Amino acid sequence: MSTPNGFPQHSRVCLTRSLEGGAVQDLQAKKAGKAAKKEAGGEAAPPKIGTPISETLKLLPEELKANMKIKSITPRPPRKPRLERAASLDEKSWRKWRRFRTSQESLTDPNETSSSNGSLQEASPSPPTRGRASPCSPCCQQDSLHSSPDALEASPAGKSRGGASDLGKRASEISSAFGGLLRGKGFAGGKPRLSQIMPARPLPPMELNVASHSLRTANRIDSDCLDYRHYSQHKFGRVSSSLSDSKLQGNGTLYDNCSTDSMKSTFSVLTPIRAKDVRSRSYLEGSLLASGALMGAEELSRYFPDRNIGIFVATWNMQGQKELPVNLDDFLLPTDPDFAQDMYVIGVQEGCPDRREWEIRLQETLGPHYVLLHSAAHGVLYMSVFIRRDLIWFCSEVEYATVTTRIVSQIKTKGALGICFTFFGTSFLFITSHFTSGDSKVNERKLDYNKTIQALTLPKNVPDTNPYRSSSSDVTTRFDEVFWFGDFNFRLNKDRETVDSILNQNPDTDVSKLLVYDQLTSEMSRGSIFKGFQEADIHFRPSYKFDIGKDSYDTTSKQRTPSYTDRVVFRSRYKDDIQAVKYSSCPVIKTSDHRPVFALFRVKLRPGRDNIPLAAGQFDRDLYLIGIRRRTTRELQKRLEQKDQRSSSICSIS
């Protein structure tokens, strides 16, 4: 068995035996001849006996091979079983080294500094150092564990051999060096060196880029909290106290700075808030650029990095039907856009008798991610505004107003309903209207429009974001973004036969020939109605008038002409603030003679001030709970029905 440094065990005993066997004279003669040869060849003479032990050990392996006559002995097991004896200091050191190699925990123990076999072999420069100097029997290998200076001092035999001659002293020094090797001591001037396993102080963490790009960027720290980790290290001495990054540093295990930096917070997914930001009173200052302002630029950029919000606007004339559609998913959640919108505004004309049931159905369809910010009614005109639940804190107080255009009628079926509020620093106005019906009553519809823009008294308490561009005679000029939708009742100035022939020729979406006869398009181009408003391109079939429950247009005796009565128009104070994404109808809902019409928009937002009346997170809590409970109940019932169908199915074998 070999020692960790590559030399055979008990080499001192083997060397002493060879010297006692008569090899001393031959060794001296050969060394003299070798010195003569080296002098002739210009080489330096080998070191004398009095030379330092470090220089002597450089030539020791070659001398032993070239100058010693050693009999080859075949290793064989001992004849008798050896009795157990007390472990020496070197054996204890060897066992401690074995535990050092097998235990991961000893890496952090500064007291265990024994050398390892692997580190010594890596430090060995040449195969002779790794190889065996002389073959030894197992018994010699057993006895060489006592070859350290401490063992020699305790043994009388060691003392006698050490004082025999100078050559014996040299052998004793060599044996002492081997003993030092076993205890982890290196050569003073030779190439073989032992590497230090544990430094005097902990190593710094290695910067390894082991985290993927998606891991580093999945939870990026917000721009205003980039210095949070540096700040925490100086104040608290650590980044966190809950996750395992501190444990990794304590155990000396590799960790990646990128992965720890990518975490927003170890306590939650919310962005950490500095104490100095909480101490500041900028929340009440109302400054547009105040740090930490609720409606300011920092919060706006955090929730809307591109400063654009998605808005769903829809209108539907329900014809006063009590029966509601079984499923509103195709209406509110079309499959064309991949993501749901941030805000849903639904206007209804001739609404169902149970308005609360209608709102519950809307909440049930939109699910727990949305809350009813506000709803209002004017007769059978309904409007509901749903918003994502984490955005309700950035809304001002919601205000609404109504206008009746048919004074004689006891039932308010014609008129307008407006809802307004400020979101961050952008003011919104939503108006749903039901204008006068009739193919030829274009002027009456224009009068309804003029009365609405003059009579709607909005805003009331919420300040105007830009009063210099407002007009007291037009409510639509007092808001940044305006959406007007409803049953405007504008018709196609063409007979039924011509319209049917055009629809039959273009069964898909080419309706440009029909829009030539559209009354609203003609009036808007002349500027007599909806001044400053725009409408997205129409690529859907007329939304009026259908037979209830069918896809065919009016087949009654009146034979009403199909028309685009249900529309969505918009205007903005600033150019290109509103971008229309989609404008379409929902043909699958057939409970009314009108098809629902909806539009999707991307609207630019601006930061605002906190010194406005805030909604402070208000929403319809009761409606939310009822809608979510019903949503869960319906899903459980659906699964139960599917289970019953599978269990009641009968398999017949023919």
Image: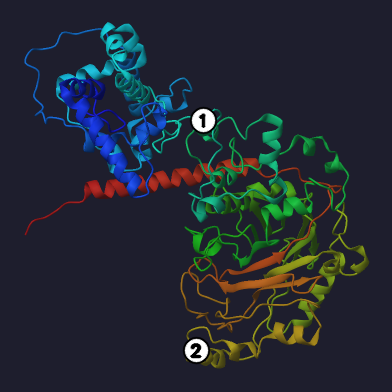
Snapshot quadrant of residue 53:
top left
Horizontal relation, residue 544 to residue 602: left or right = left
| Residue behind mark 2 | 506
Q: Is residue 196 above or below residue 219?
A: above
Horizontal relation, residue 489 to residue 278: left or right = left
Report x, y in % for residue 37: 29, 45
Q: Tag 1's secondary structure?
A: loop
| Residue behind mark 1 | 199
Figure quadrant of the N terminus = top left
Marks 2/1: CA distance? Answer: 83 Å
Give the amino acid at mark 1. Answer: Pro
Report x, y in % for residue 140: 18, 20
Residue at 62% over, 72% down: 581
Residue count near mark 1 (Cα–Cα under 10 Å), binned few <14, some 14–19, many ≥20: few
Residue count near mark 2 (Cα–Cα under 10 Å), binned few <14, some 14–19, many ≥20: some
Question: Which of the two residues, 289 or 79, is positioned nearer the viewer here?
Answer: 79
Figure quadrant of the C terminus = bottom left
Q: Is residue 313 above or below residue 495?
A: above
Q: Is residue 139 above or below residue 393?
A: above
Pointer 2 or 1: first along the chain: 1
Q: Tag 2's secondary structure?
A: loop
Question: Which of the two residues, 274 or 294, is positioned nearer the viewer here?
Answer: 274
Give the amino acid at mark 2. Answer: Asn
Nearer the camera: disc 2 or disc 1: 1
Report x, y in % for residue 454: 87, 68
Taking the image as drawn, is residue 548 in sight?
yes
Residue at 76% over, 67% down: 482
Report x, y in % for residue 629: 51, 41
